[in-house]
C-alpha cells in the first residue's frame, strides 16, 4: 500500500470526485438563485398588471 | 363480448373493401423471402434459416400492424369513440391483428420453406410457436401502433417504438424455434413456453389496462 | 438549515468517496481471469443499480401521472428517465471496457448485456416519442403510457430470460439475474452496498436539479 504508492492514485481520484460533488453543489446554489430571481420577476409582473 | 365480435367483423369488412392494402402486405413479405433466397441461393444453414425467417416474420408483422390504427381516419376514430368501450376496441384490434399476423406468418413460412428448403424437424411444435408468437406480436404491435397513430407526422415512429419492446419476445421465439430445428434435451422448452405465455398475456393485459388513457382526446 | 436541507447530498457524496478510497485500498480475493479488476464491481455494477433505481422512479411518476395528470409529475418522470439513461450509458461504457479485458471482446452474447442494451434502446425510443409530439398534455400522457408498457415487458425480459439461459458468463450469476451477492466476499459487500446507495443519492440529487431547471424553463415559456 505504502510502497507501491497506490495511495497517491486514490488521492487523485478522491480529489477529482470531491471536486465534482462540490461543483454539483455550486450548480444547486445557482439553480436556487435562478428560481428566486424568476419568482421575484413574476411577482413584479403580476403587481404591474 | 358481442361488441368485440362486431368490431372484428367491421375490421374484416373494411379490409375486404380495399383488397389492394392486404395484397400489398403479402407482396412485401414475398419480396423479402425472395431477396433472402437470392442472398443465400437456397443454401441456408439451420441457425441462419431460423434467424432469417423470424426477422422476415417480424418485419412483415410490423408492416401489417402499422395500419391497425394508422389506417383509421380521424372521423372514423371519433365514430368508434362514441360507439364503443375503448377496451373492446383494443381487444378487437388485437384479435384481428393476431389473426392477420398468424395468416401472414403461415403463408410466409410456407413460401420460405418452398424457396429455402425445410429445416424443421418438429412441425407441430413449430406451428404452436407460430401461434403463440403471433399472439404476442399481435398484442405488442397493435398497442405500439395505437401509440404511434397518435402522432401522424413521424412515419418511422411505429418501428422505433416496437423494436426494443419486441426484442425479448423475438429472442424467446428464435430460441424456441431453434429447438424445432435441432431438438436437444438440454433446452428448457417448458420454461420458455411458459415465459412466452406470460409475455403474451402480459402484453394483452397491459394493452387492456392502458388503452383507455390513449384513447381520450 | 444547510445541513438539514442538504445532509443527504453530503452523505451520498461521502458514501461514494468511501467506496473509492476503501474499494481501491482493501485486499480483494484473487480470482482467476479477473484478478484486481474485481474492484470494478464497486464502480461498474453500481452504475446499473443506479440506472434501475432511476427508471423505477420514472415508472412510479408515469403511473402517478396517469392517475392524476399534473405537469410536474411528467417532468419528474422524464428527468428520472434522462438521469437513468445517463447512468446506464456509463454502465455500458465501463462494462465494455471491463469485458474487453476479461472476456477478450467488448460485446458478448449474455442475457445481462442484452437486457441492458434493450433497456437503453427502449428509453431512446421513449425520448424520440416525446420529441415528436408537440402538445404538452398529449406528450405527457402518451409517453407515460409507453413508459409503463415498455417497463413491464422489460421486467419480464430482465427477470425471466436470464433464468432461462443455459449459462451466463457474468461471474457467480449463472442462472441468476440478481447479483451473485451470496458468493461475495463480506469485506467487498461492505464497500459495494454503500457505493450503490451513495450513487443512487447522487443520481437523485442530479434529478432534483434537472427538475428545477426544467420547471424554470417551463415557467419562462408560459410567461
Image (tube, coloured by chain):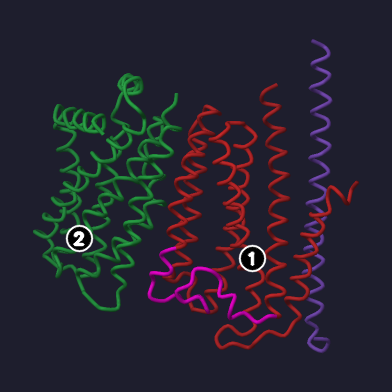
Chain colours: A purple, B green, C red
From the viewer's side, name the closer residue of B108 and B210: B210
Residue A12 position in % (x across, y down): 80, 71
Disc 2 target residue: B39
Classified by dominant secondary structure, the portion drawn in magenta counts as: loop
Left or right? Give the position of A48 relative to C190: right
In the displayed structure, C30 sits above or below C178; it is below
Residue B184 position in % (x across, y down): 24, 77
From the viewer's side, name the closer residue of B24 and C71: C71
- Report the residue that reaches farthest toward the front: B1
Q: Secondary structure at mark 1?
A: helix
* Magenta stretch in the rendered image: C160-186
Location of residue B125 (image quadrant): bottom left
In the displayed structure, B113 sits above or below C55; it is below
Q: Badge 2, how many Cα within 10 Å: few under 14, some, many 20+?
A: few
State the mark number for residue C46.
1
From the viewer's side, name the closer residue of B101 and B20: B101
Image point (45%, 48%), residue name: C150
Residue B3 position in % (x across, y down): 26, 29
Left or right? Give the position of C133 relative to B53: right
Q: Is residue C77 magenta?
A: no
Q: Secondary structure at mark 2?
A: helix
Left or right? Give the position of B80 relative to A9: left
Image point (47%, 52%), residue name: C121
Image point (49%, 68%), residue name: C177
Residue B189 position in % (x across, y down): 28, 69
Amino acid at each position: 500500500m505504502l510502497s507501491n504508492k497506490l495511495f497517491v492514485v486514490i488521492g487523485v481520484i478522491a480529489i477529482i470526485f470531491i471536486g465534482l460533488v462540490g461543483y454539483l453543489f455550486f450548480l444547486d446554489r445557482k439553480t436556487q438563485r435562478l428560481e428566486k430571481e424568476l419568482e421575484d420577476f413574476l411577482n413584479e409582473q403580476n403587481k404591474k398588471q | 363480448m358481442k361488441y368485440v365480435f362486431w368490431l372484428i367483423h367491421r375490421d374484416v369488412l373494411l379490409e375486404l373493401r380495399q383488397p389492394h392494402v392486404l395484397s400489398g402486405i403479402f407482396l412485401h413479405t414475398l419480396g423479402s423471402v425472395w431477396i433472402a433466397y437470392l442472398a443465400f441461393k437456397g443454401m441456408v444453414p439451420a441457425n441462419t434459416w431460423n434467424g432469417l425467417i423470424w426477422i422476415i416474420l417480424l418485419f412483415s408483422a410490423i408492416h401489417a400492424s402499422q395500419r391497425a390504427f394508422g389506417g383509421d381516419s380521424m372521423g372514423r376514430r371519433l365514430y368508434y369513440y362514441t360507439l364503443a368501450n375503448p377496451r373492446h376496441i383494443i381487444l378487437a384490434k388485437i384479435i384481428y391483428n393476431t389473426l392477420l399476423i398468424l395468416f401472414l406468418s403461415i403463408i410466409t413460412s410456407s413460401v420460405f420453406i418452398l424457396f429455402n428448403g425445410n429445416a424443421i424437424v418438429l412441425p407441430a411444435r413449430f406451428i404452436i410457436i407460430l401461434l403463440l408468437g403471433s399472439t404476442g406480436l399481435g398484442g405488442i404491435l397493435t398497442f405500439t401502433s395505437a401509440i404511434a397513430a397518435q402522432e401522424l407526422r413521424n412515419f418511422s415512429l411505429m418501428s422505433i417504438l416496437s423494436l426494443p419492446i419486441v426484442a425479448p419476445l423475438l429472442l424467446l421465439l428464435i430460441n424456441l424455434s431453434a429447438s424445432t430445428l435441432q431438438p436437444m434435451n438440454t433446452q428448457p422448452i417448458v420454461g420458455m413456453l411458459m415465459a412466452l405465455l406470460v409475455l403474451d398475456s402480459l402484453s394483452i393485459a397491459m394493452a387492456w389496462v392502458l388503452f383507455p388513457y390513449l384513447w381520450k382526446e | 438549515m444547510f445541513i438539514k436541507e442538504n445532509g443527504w447530498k453530503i452523505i451520498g457524496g461521502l458514501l461514494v468517496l468511501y467506496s473509492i478510497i476503501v474499494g481501491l485500498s482493501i485486499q480483494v480475493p484473487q480470482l482467476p481471469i479477473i484478478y484486481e479488476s474485481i474492484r470494478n464491481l464497486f464502480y461498474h455494477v453500481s452504475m446499473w443499480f443506479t440506472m434501475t433505481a432511476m427508471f423505477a422512479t420514472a415508472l412510479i411518476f408515469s403511473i402517478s401521472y396517469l392517475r392524476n395528470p399534473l405537469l410536474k409529475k411528467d417532468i419528474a418522470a422524464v428527468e428520472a428517465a434522462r438521469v437513468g439513461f445517463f447512468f446506464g450509458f456509463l454502465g455500458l461504457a465501463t462494462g465494455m471496457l471491463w469485458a474487453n479485458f476479461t472476456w477478450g471482446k467488448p460485446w458478448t452474447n449474455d442475457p445481462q448485456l442484452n437486457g441492458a442494451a434493450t433497456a437503453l434502446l427502449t428509453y431512446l425510443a421513449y425520448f424520440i416519442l416525446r420529441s415528436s409530439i408537440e402538445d404538452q398534455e398529449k406528450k405527457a400522457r402518451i409517453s407515460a403510457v409507453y413508459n409503463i408498457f415498455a417497463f413491464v415487458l422489460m421486467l419480464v425480459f430482465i427477470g425471466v430470460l436470464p433464468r432461462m439461459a443455459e449459462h451466463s458468463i457474468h461471474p457467480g450469476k449463472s442462472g441468476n439475474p440478481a447479483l451473485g451477492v451470496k458468493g461475495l466476499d463480506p469485506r467487498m459487500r461492505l464497500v459495494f452496498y454503500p457505493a450503490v446507495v451513495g450513487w443512487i443519492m447522487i443520481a437523485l440529487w442530479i434529478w432534483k436539479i434537472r427538475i428545477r431547471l426544467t420547471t424554470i424553463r417551463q415557467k419562462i415559456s408560459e410567461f
